[in-house]
Image: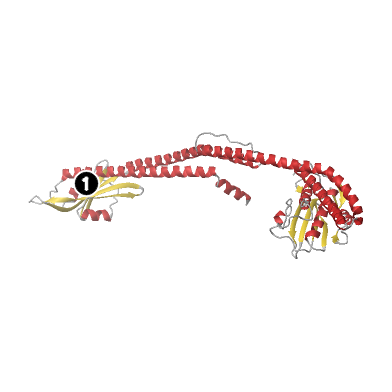
Amino acid sequence: MTFWRSVAAQASSLRVRLLLAFALLGVTTTAVVASGSYFQARTVILQQAQDAAVMSLTDQLTKVYPIAQLPPTQNDLDLLAQRLSDREGFAVVIYRDMRAQGSQTPAPLSPELRAEVGDGQIAWQRVSQHGRPWLLIGTQLRLERPDGTAHPSGLEVYSVRDLVPEQQSIDQLATRAWWTGGLSLLLAVLLALLSARGVLRPVRDLGRAARRLGEGDLSTRLTVRGVDELADVARTFNDTAGTLERQVGELRRMESDARRFVADVSHELRTPLAAMTAVTDVLDEEAEHLPGDAGRAARLVSQETQNLTHLVNDLIEISRFDSGTARLALDDVDVGAAVTATLRIRGWTDRVRADLPPAVVARLDPRRLDVIVANLVGNAFRHGAEPVTVRVSADPDWVTIEVADQGPGLDPEVLPHVFDRFYKADTARTRSEGSGLGLAISWENARLHRHGERRGALVAGNAPGGGAVFTLRLPRETTDTGGAR
């Protein structure tokens, strides 16, 4: 199947189509011209031979006309046949049942020809006998009356001419026509190759340049040759590539500035946030002793400070992903034990149904695994419904962790954007309980784990019976320490 697809692709290529078009044009033109010339020359040759034979027969008949007496004797017929025969042909003379001819060669007289001659007409016919062409011309001699008028005598005279020389000339014309056709076809193929080369070279250059441009080499340009349509295409491509390079460069600069801004702001906020966290720790201790609104305000400030701290930490983590500086600290991890530790530290052990087979060991970053599982389980608690289930499974190449809840599930319009940064399924909701970066960070952490062509992945979906399902797949033997996106 692959072979035939390859053959079909080659047959439909522009080069092959150009060759076929030129060849078809050359063959058609040659066939029309050669066949037209052949038939015209053939007609001229045969017509000249026919006219010459008719004139020769007429001249010869004038020498023996008129007939002295009727009916003629056999000797008269033999003598007349001999006198009308020459080196270009022989004559056949027929009078009723008597017949004479000037050669031993059988004369292929047809009934149709004899019928026309019997009606008093001059008739001719080309026939082939045993592969040999003949020209037959027949007429009926007229008998002169005493009053000077003439009437048909019943004496039929036929001139039989050999057309072999003419046939040889015609065969030579046919051979030349075939040779002309073959040479024209060869010339058409050569012209097609040259034309295809001239047309396809800029097309191939354009294809290669488009591929390089698609691969990110925005400095790609074409060499403009000539002033034809292909040169216009090359100039248009260069203008488009230049515009794209400028726009992408500006976007990259803006993106770099935005990332640097976020990273700088996040790092600058860490110091005042550390001081604020220390103050809120004191407020937390004194909140119970503060009266009414003061106590609620202290707890609110403490909670918002923690949220801000989490947001800044998430932004710093995102900036590491964007800059390609995120690295993995790999270790051999018992996945089931690591998931259990994540649930226990956050007090979720009693709220989560865990299916964790023992001795599932994988080489990965335990801190990032903890972040992923915590984000997925916390997301299930916030937006789904209990009970929340965590299942671990493994094969020789992959470790799979599945987090499911019993909530309403994810809307089909939400699924493509679940891992987008700051994405809100409810646009009317101005704030969310988290930073809006948890799932995005989990997705990036999953992709950091690689082994050769295998790369970690985090996928969102819905269970058949309802509820959201997040599936994390990590290679069991991670060897890439991250960095590249």
Q: Mark 1 falls on what kind of element?
A: helix
Image colouring: secondary structure
Determine which residue is flagged by label 1: 81
Name of the residue lying farthest toward the left: 147
Q: Going 78% across and 52% down the picture, which residue do you hit?
A: 435
Instruction: Give the image location of residue 363, x and y in percent.
Output: 84, 48
- Type of amino acid under label 1: Ala
Instruction: Give the image location of residue 406, x and y in percent.
Output: 78, 64
Residue situated in front as seen by the camera: 126 or 422: 422
Q: Going 58% across and 37% down the picture, which residue do you hit?
A: 238
Residue situated in front as seen by the camera: 398 or 304: 304
- Using the rendered image of the protein, determine whether residue 360 is visible from the camera's viewpoint: no
Instruction: Give the image location of residue 371, x and y in percent.
Output: 83, 51
Quarter-of-image position of residue 339: bottom right
Residue situated in front as seen by the camera: 156 or 342: 342
Q: Quadrant of the C terminus?
A: top right
Specify whether 310 is left or right of 230: right
Quarter-of-image position of residue 224: top right
Against 422, residue 48 (above or below) is: above
Against 343, residue 55 (above or below) is: above
Specify whether 72 is left or right of 232: left
Q: Residues within 10 Å of mark 1 (few under 14, many from 20)?
A: many
Instruction: Give the image location of residue 471, x and y in percent.
Output: 77, 56
Residue situated in front as seen by the camera: 410 or 153: 410
Name of the residue lying farthest toward the bottom: 465
Specify whether 349 is left or right of 194: right
Specify whether 423 is left or right of 157: right
* Number of marks: 1
- Using the rendered image of the protein, determine whether residue 222 is visible from the camera's viewpoint: yes
